[in-house]
Image (spheres, rainbow, N blue to C red):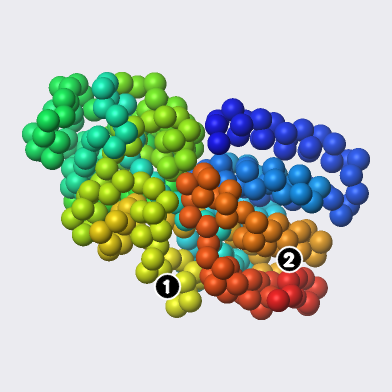
Amino acid sequence: MKITKILYTIAFLAATMLGASSVSYAEAIINGAGASFPAPLYTKWTYEYHKSTGKKINYQSIGSGGGIRAIKGKTVDFGASDAPLKADDLEKSGLIQFPMAIGGVVPVVNIKSIKPGELKLTPDVLSDIFLGTITRWDDKRIKKINKGLKLPSDKITVVRRSDGSGTTWIFTNYLAKVSKEWKEKVGFGKAVSWPTGVGGKGNEGVASYVKRLNNSIGYVEYAYALQNKLSNARLKNKDGKFASPSIKSFMAAAAGADWKNTPGYSVVLTDQPGKKAWPIAGATFILVHKEADNCTTASGVLEFFDWAYKNGAKMATSLDYVPIPKDVYSMMESTWAEEINCNGSPVWSK
């Protein structure tokens, strides 16, 4: 889906808010906010859901950190995060989380004459670029793994997120797994103390900066790389193979995910084994309160995500996300029935 289409959709959803006073209570807008990682997919889903049902969902792409704060503060009806909350945090906050899709975070570059997939990077080289240790594109370590590729001697401009972000959580979680120096000096989280680089807000902001700045490198969710026609790098995975980002490589990374036995369903998919596995994959999650204040709204939230599970798979793959398998979302919906209540009664029935 093109950026213009996304902007049109967002404009359409915003316009529906202006007319909210003229619709019945049952059709009141449901509000969600959070991760920009799945924003293209959620925008598509909300648009098609409105066309199909007449019901309105408003989703704001404000970053995972903002989404977590918003749902904890009860200023939205659901939050979205790519950084899964731990079971004790969920319990303390009275929340449950469930996955909605799986995607990939990709390094993107703007180097003259370099086409998508031409540049190869190893885990140590990628981490050292973002540490600021490797500063020029013709560094001998980059040239060694890219024999025959014409690399400029120009300085590398690192672009990273300026806001709290699940995309950053996934990316830095990967770097902390593959680089001891990164783990010790920077660590991982939704926001970190970056050693170098310029900051962009949201996946949109990072993509925009990389597109404008020559000799830059950043990291974005794969859909943003495609929409902005950015050149993605290939990465050496845990099995020693140079993988390319794609539906198949994201699925390969998720193949061994154990949702059933992971507390809070907080599965992490970075640096997974598999010859075809993309090493920086991750699930994106929805957060809702276990004890709902408004029964109608709580039911409406779950109705939308039930619709997305059952009707949104093709839309997900068309935007290069991996849909959640039926056996997994059936398990999620059983959790809804068991754990989400309003006025002492279950909000969802199996």
**Residue 329 visible in the current orientation:** yes
Q: Is residue 94 left or right of residue 49?
A: left
Q: Looking at the image, which residue is at 28% across and 62% down?
A: 274
Q: Which mark is residue 292?
A: 2
Q: Is residue 133 left or right of residue 302?
A: left
Who is closer to the viewer here, 318 or 294?
A: 318
> Amino acid under label 2?
Ala
Residue 136: name its quadrant.
top left
Instruction: Work out which quarter of the rendered image holds the C terminus and state it.
Output: bottom right
x then y, percent, for residue 91: 56, 71
**Residue 191 visible in the current orientation:** no
Binning the other alpha carbons within 10 Å of mark 2 as few (below 14), some (14 to 19) or many (20 upward) gives many
Position above or below: 54 against 273:
above
Pair 1/2: label in front: 1
Q: CA distance from mark 1 to mark 2?
A: 28 Å
Who is closer to the viewer here, 275 or 212?
A: 275
Tag 1–tag 2 contact (CB < 8 Å): no
> Amino acid under label 1?
Asp
x then y, percent, for residue 19: 85, 36
x then y, percent, for residue 256: 37, 69
Residue 22: name its quadrant.
top right
Q: Looking at the image, which residue is at 79% across and 51% down?
A: 53
Q: Which mark is residue 213?
A: none
Position above or below: 56 against 110:
below
Name the element at disc 2. Answer: loop
Residue marked by disc 1 = 258
Instruction: Work out which quarter of the rendered image holds the N terminus and state it.
Output: top right
Q: Looking at the image, which residue is at 32% across and 40% down?
A: 107
Residue 73: name its quadrant.
bottom right
Say whether disc 1 or disc 2 marks the residue closer to the N-terminus: 1
Binning the other alpha carbons within 10 Å of mark 1 as few (below 14), some (14 to 19) or many (20 upward) gives few
